[in-house]
Image: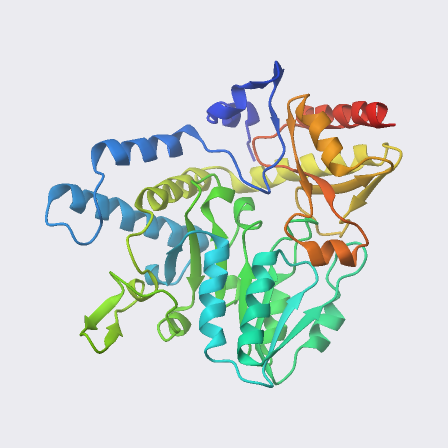
Amino acid sequence: MSFDVAAIRAEFPILSQTVDGKPLVYLDNGATTQKPQVVIDSLVDFYTQCNANVHRGAHQLSDEATRRYEKARDQVARFINAANRNEVIWTSGTTEGINLVAKGLAQQLEAGDEVVVTEMEHHANLVTWQQACLQSGATLRVAPIFDNGELDLETFKASLGPNTRMVAFPHVSNALGTVNPVKELTAMAKAYGALVLVDGAQGIAHGDVDVQALGCDFYAFSGHKVFGPTGIGVLWGKQSVLENWPVWLTGGEMIADVTYQSATWGALPNRLEAGTPNIAGAIGLGTALEWFSQLDIAAVQAHEKALIDSAMAQAADIQGMRLIGTAPNKIGILSFVMDNAHPADIGFILDRQGIAIRTGDNCAQPLMHRLGINGTARASFSLYNTLEEVSAFFAGLRKAQTMLG
């Protein structure tokens, strides 16, 4: 394995800047990752060389834009090991992908049907199903977690039954860092014939996402959390499921035939991609995934494990610091609360030292209530972070404790 973090960092121009005269230590990767120069260049190149709409222009610019746009679909399909490129549906992000599925499911649910989620959900993977159930008269079941943030597998299994129509859960919890056993959970749901959607927003940037091996029916993720642009995402779904899935958005591009009285939908992927897409965003995401794929993923994962291991070890030496999310299988997210210190104050003091973290409820209010807190401070790590930055973060925390003490 080989991993040169200094060389990686040199590809991210934003990481060389300072904040209030101090080197930027960017530890808010769970919210969004930074972009390598190659991704930035791909956006500039599109807008300066071939900016045009795709699929419909009878000219060279449109042909080149279409070629790059559809190449990006192929790049996504390879990255997640989709069986077919038509299973890759462009969205604005994870939230739209989940909504696309939930809006279609709501048209199929009936009273007595059940949807199962977990206590660790981000709002995007909770409110969507909640509303689908309210609309249809179905029942939403919430599988519990243990206090350490680990999913209670036995109770999860007991939550399933012959009326379960959909099971949705995160690959990785955005607030806890818990990595869920996707294959095992999917197999449990499939035993009852349920569909399975995985919220991959936090899982996609850590490598080894093989949708065929996972066995799920849907996997949704956002480009901006995997070194790509904002405003672009992917819903992957099995072709056998997607080709008959109820459409949510209607308009241009997704039509097969239309009259003033009726319309029929086109084939995949067009039938689920209404309107002019985020062409530049798709191209940028394809570039990001191509860039990521060229790295030694095992070495990346080892580096990220070293970061979270160091953070967990140093946290043990901070008096009054309580970690939120200590599941045995955990990835680079460190959420915490501190005695006599509001998370927002911690974030403010760290920011004055050039250290960027997230504070608040992490768009997971029910989870915060389940854990008996209002919110956390959260440091989240990516492949370009260093062990020195982890130590700088804890030095900043000690300073915050002194100032707030």
Residue 72 left/right relative to 163: left
Residue 401 left/right relative to 284: right
Q: What residue sits 58% from the left and 81% below the top?
A: 137
Residue 373 left/right relative to 319: left
Q: Residue furthest left?
A: 58
Relative to 295, residue 277 above or below: below
Camera sees residue 210: no
Quadrant location of residue 77?
bottom left
Relative to 108, residue 309 above or below: above
Task: Give the image location of residue 255, x and y in percent.
Answer: 24, 67
Task: Give the image location of residue 40, x and y in percent.
Answer: 38, 31
Q: Please state, as top left, top right, bottom left or bottom right, where the C terminus lies in the image.
A: top right
Q: Residue furthest front?
A: 260
Quadrant location of residue 316?
top right
Relative to 238, residue 193 above or below: below
Camera sees residue 118: yes
Task: Give the image location of residue 285, x and y in percent.
Answer: 40, 43
Task: Give the image location of residue 369, x and y in percent.
Answer: 76, 56
Q: What residue sits 10% from the left and 50% below the top?
A: 58
Q: Please state, as top left, top right, bottom left or bottom right, where the N terminus lies in the image.
A: top right
